[in-house]
Amino acid sequence: METFNPLRDAVPLGELKRVLVIKLRHHGDVLVSSPVFSVLKAHAPQVEIDALVYADTAEMLTLHPAIDAVHVIDRKWKKLGVVGQVKAELALYGALKARGYDLIIHLTEHWRGAWLCRLLQPRWSVGPAVGGRSKRWRQSFTHLQSAPRNALRHMVEANLDALRRIGIQPAPEERRMLLVPGAAAEAGVAKHLAGFGLKGGDFIHIHPASRWFFKCWPVDRMAALVERLQAEGHAVVMTAAPSDDEKAMLTAIQAQLPKPAFSLSGQLSLKELAALTQASKLFIGVDSAPMHIAAAVGTPTVALFGPSGDKQWGPWGVPFRVISSQQHPCRPCGIDGCGGGKVSDCLTSLTVDAVLAAAHELLAR
């Protein structure tokens, strides 16, 4: 029996052969779009699904079982000169054109998605309704997705709204995020852990930094947390991105510890970071891509939130605790520190005791 669908312009899923999903944003943004691929595959199992992302974020989606190909736009193309960049863009266009997409799902406000819909001419296309955009934007898509009017809808659900707009209603069990580290990353991490005398489930993973430092907890608080966890007998493995500022933050934390934590600062790829988190018994961090990675690999998560919105960006689909200030009604403000000063009072007010209590609750599950 055919299921009734009240949406008059729903896309007939049985007629789909190939779909392109475009997500041109940062690492965490790309990862929270991963349920779109799983849900679409569950409702149209015959379809081949491709992704288009920035090259540096591709590892968020490669090896995803619902994705057939990950196409990339490399920001470094700009360094190739005009001729080199044009050649790279034409090669990408040729690869996408050859796939013959029936449907394009554009998940951001980036104009490139609109132009690709015009150039590739899929039968159906869905993109976000953007206030103030010209008729050219609106006419680039056959379906426009309405945006949430408040900051309380999680970005996973906001991404899935693109599927709802074309007639797909995701079941709750289909909506989890997914990142597959892969065998090579898992083996590399196992080797690192063996060097520390550890194995999977033996340790807590802490990633204290974000690419935006106004989202970070003070160094002295993080050091105090690590020291107390160590005093309780927990092994702690700390990580940082390869950037100089993140590595410097981790070094500063280590300098305040009587006994340095195990460190893989700047040594891991994104897939290896995921493998490490997957092997840990608990992840502790701030609003960052590693926090989303923890959720995507199923690791219980303690997340510290300051000026960013935990309702939109909190851990998704895993046991978690969000630590945020109840004394600052101005949060979430989205500002890069109070007054733009890079330091957020709503973060500096968070106590070690509160974070430790949350960690205890999740470890006891």
Image: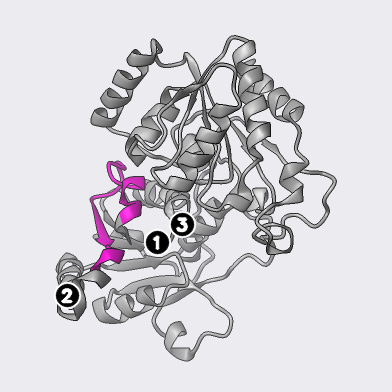
Q: CA distance from mark 2 to mark 3?
A: 33 Å
Disc 1 + disc 2, Cβ < 8 Å: no
Does residue 255 appear left or right of residue 217 in this picture?
Answer: left
Secondary structure of the residue carrying tag 1 is loop
Q: CA distance from mark 1 to mark 3?
A: 19 Å
Provide residue 233's location: percent of width, then percent of height: 59, 9
- Specify the amino acid type for callout 2: Leu
Where's the C terminus, which quadrant? top right
Identity of the residue drawn at 49% across and 56% down: 160
> What's the magenta region?
56-77
> Which label's residue is closer to the chain start, 1 or 2?
1
Does residue 216 appear left or right of residue 298 in this picture?
Answer: right
Does residue 296 appear left or right of residue 189 in this picture?
Answer: right
Provide residue 82's location: percent of width, then percent of height: 20, 80
- Disc number for residue 168: 3
Provide residue 106's location: percent of width, then percent of height: 40, 67
Does residue 27 appear left or right of residue 341 in this picture?
Answer: left
Instruction: Name the quadrant containing residue 287.
Output: top right
**135 or 299, which lies in front?**
299
Q: Is residue 40 magenta?
A: no
- Specify the amino acid type for callout 3: Ile
Mark 1 = which residue? Answer: 23
> Which label's residue is closer to the chain start, 1 or 3?
1
Up-down relation of residue 93 to residue 218 (above or below): below
Mark 2 = which residue? Answer: 90
Question: How many discs appear?
Answer: 3
Secondary structure of the residue carrying tag 3 is loop
Label 2 Cα crowd, 10 Å radius (few <14 / some 14-19 / many 20+): few
Q: CA distance from mark 1 to mark 2?
A: 19 Å
Secondary structure of the residue carrying tag 2 is helix
